[in-house]
Image (cartoon, helix red, strand yellow):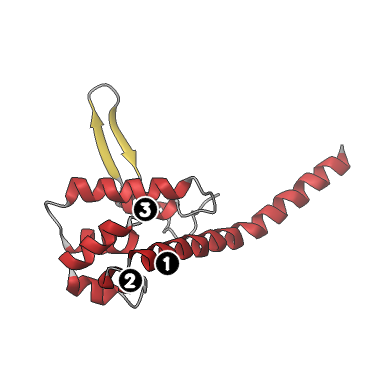
């Protein structure tokens, strides 16, 4: 696998990486939080709580310094309905600019938590289906490869 779905090439990911310094291990490089969130948008159900935790952790760590890039990230990726309602109240201009790309923000603006939860669930299902479609050709190719290997044995 040379490229992750919906993520740029390695060089771009490397340039955006997060480096953590550890006194014992030295420098450790990891995907940026935004890239890790994008990478976790898979069909696996267990990835979605991790996305919510990553975005919440990022918000808690960075909310004292809400620059434009961070605000847009939180509005695009927040999975917790109550947090999303609070964010649209704090950042109305940014919300308006993103609403065409993430229509469920209208539910957060109105404070309609049941509709927002439903829309968030629909968003997850759409991403999971997108992931299934992405991997389907590779899955078929691998199954064909295995079948040919069994026939040769």
Q: CA distance from mark 2 to mark 1?
A: 8 Å
Mark 2 sits on what residue?
107
Q: Quadrant of residue 12?
A: bottom left
Seen from the viewer's position, the closer of residues 35 and 96 is 96
Q: Nearer the viewer, mark 3 or mark 2?
A: 2
Q: Residues within 10 Å of mark 1 (few under 14, many from 20)?
A: some
Seen from the viewer's position, the closer of residues 21 and 91 is 91
Q: Are marks 2 and 1 in contact (CB under 8 Å)?
A: yes
Mark 1 sits on what residue?
119
Figure check: 46 above or below 109: above
Q: Residues within 10 Å of mark 2 (few under 14, many from 20)?
A: some
Q: Nearer the viewer, mark 1 or mark 3?
A: 1
Could you tell me residue 35's position as x and y percent?
36, 53
The local secondary structure at tag 2 comes to helix
Q: CA distance from mark 1 to mark 3?
A: 23 Å
Q: Are marks 1 and 3 in contact (CB under 8 Å)?
A: no
Seen from the viewer's position, the closer of residues 144 and 92 is 92
Residue 150 showing in the rendered view: yes
Could you tell me residue 3's position as x and y percent?
50, 54
Could you tell me residue 96's position as x and y percent?
24, 76
Mark 3 sits on what residue?
35
The local secondary structure at tag 3 comes to helix
Task: Report the quarter where the C terminus lies.
Answer: top right
């Amino acid at each position: 696998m040379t490229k992750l779905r919906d993520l740029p090439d390695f060089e771009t990911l490397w340039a955006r990486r997060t480096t953590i310094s550890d006194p014992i291990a030295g420098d450790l490089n990891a995907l940026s939080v935004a890239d890790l969130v994008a990478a976790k948008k898979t069909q696996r159900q267990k990835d979605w709580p991790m996305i919510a935790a990553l975005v919440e952790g990022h918000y808690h760590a960075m909310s004292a310094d809400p620059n434009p890039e961070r605000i847009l990230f939180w509005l695009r990726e927040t999975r917790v309905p109550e947090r999303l309602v609070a964010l649209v109240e704090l950042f109305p201009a940014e919300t308006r600019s993103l609403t065409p790309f993430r229509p469920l923000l209208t539910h957060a603006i109105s404070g309609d938590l049941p509709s927002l939860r439903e829309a968030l669930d629909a968003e997850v299902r759409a991403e999971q289906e997108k992931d299934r479609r992405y991997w389907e050709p590779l899955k078929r190719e691998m199954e064909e490869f295995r079948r040919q290997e069994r026939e040769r044995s």
